[in-house]
Image (tube, rainbow, N blue to C red):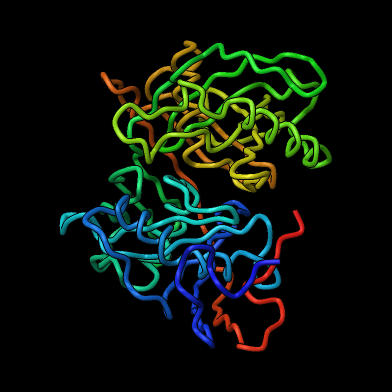
Amino acid sequence: MDQAVSGGGPPVPRRLTVSTVDYHTAGEPYRIVVGGVAPLSGETVLDKRSDAIHRLDHVRRFLVNEPRGHADMYGCFVTAPDDDTAEFGMVFFHKDGFSTACGHGTIAGATWAIDNGVVAVPAGAEVTRFKLDVPSGRLAVEADLVDGRVGEVRFTNVAAAVRADDVAVRLDDGTEVEVAVAYGGAHYAVLAASDVGLAVEPVHVDDFVRLGRAIKAALVGHPATVHPTDERLSGLYGVIFFDDDPAAGVAGAALRQRNITVFADGEVDRSPCGSGTSARLAVLHHQGALDVGEILSHRGIAGGLFAGRVVSTGADGVVTQIGGRASLSGYHTFVLEPDDELGLGFQLR
């Protein structure tokens, strides 16, 4: 059980009250903090992530732990951008800490910003475009508007790149699999579900969690997971298991696949995973399976779809664009009373 004092951080106020607006993107939750928390400090959003790790970890735990959250909860602190050429910034968090990238959160956060006037939209506009900052860098966003409502949101991600395409990993049962390691704002190991004798279906979620944890543990400190310019972006964030999607997907797609992404410590992304889709696109392009401009129809374990494509190539890798939709799911004011015996809450896995 978590206690009411953040490990290494400041004491939790006697009564903690935090307001959020919740969305989901293709089934993956996104809890946006809109009140009750002091602004983050730092010159860049990556610096502000460091401030959140040091100073606001108790708020993260309060919002993602049971009974207010759950083991697969996700959220963000909204913050100022790196400079005034972007509209706002987001610092992402989950049950185990603070991530560097989050595509489903980018889609949900952009939808929230338009819904709530954080981003001004000209009257009658059918598409609006703006920039936002996240720890991994600056993202260009465009959103469709239909009868004043936000439709699909597309973001152009930071450069994605394959770090290694043939890393051998020995599993607990003694078998060996090969994974690609790719970066899409965070590092992912990528392999076919069939390589571990499974299909991407909900009935196998527990097996994927177990295998995802094992593969991630085996790659701790691997050179392919080291970011070339900033150590804060290093480390393996998640493991992507993929197979072919037998269902109809995004119209006009050259390739249809489905995936389950296990990230952090056994957390399951319900969506197709936005930064993971960028990493997947880098691998597919590297393997010659998807050309520039061709669409990947990417289905998540909950059935939702993202459309992804490589828009250009360069020295740093490939530039990708990911599209999906988010929906409002709730407004909340969460309270921690001083005599709550569960404090900041708990996790059962």
Q: Please indicate, yes or no, whether residue 147 appears anywhere in the rendered image.
A: no
- On the rendered image, what quadrant is the N terminus found in? bottom right
Q: Which residue is pictured at 56% across the width and 11% down the height?
A: 166
Whether 297 is drawn above or below 129: the answer is above
Left or right relative to 214: residue 137:
left
User: Do we see residue 84 in this rendering?
Assistant: yes
What is the x, y in percent for residue 173?
82, 21
**Residue found farthest to the left:** 84
Q: Horizontal placement of 70 versus 276: left or right?
A: right
Residue 341 in the image, given as x and y percentages of width and height? 71, 81
Q: Where is residue 301 in the image (x, y as percent from the top left)?
A: 69, 42
- State how many labels appear: 0
Residue 162: image location, x then y, percent: 44, 20
Residue 68 sits in which quadrant? bottom right
Residue at screen point 77% across, 37% down? 201
Residue at the spot 56% in from the left edge and 57% down from the top edge: 74
Residue extending furthest front? 8
Task: Compare residues 56 and 159 and report the one nearer the observer.
Answer: 56
Q: In this picture, is 287 found above or below 208?
A: above
Give 225 or 151, whichever is nearer the viewer. 225
Q: In this view, does 341 lie to the left or right of 150?
A: right
Q: Return the residue nearer the eye: 291 or 113.
A: 113
Q: In this view, does 36 lie above or below 277?
A: below
**Residue displayed at 73% across by 39% down:** 209
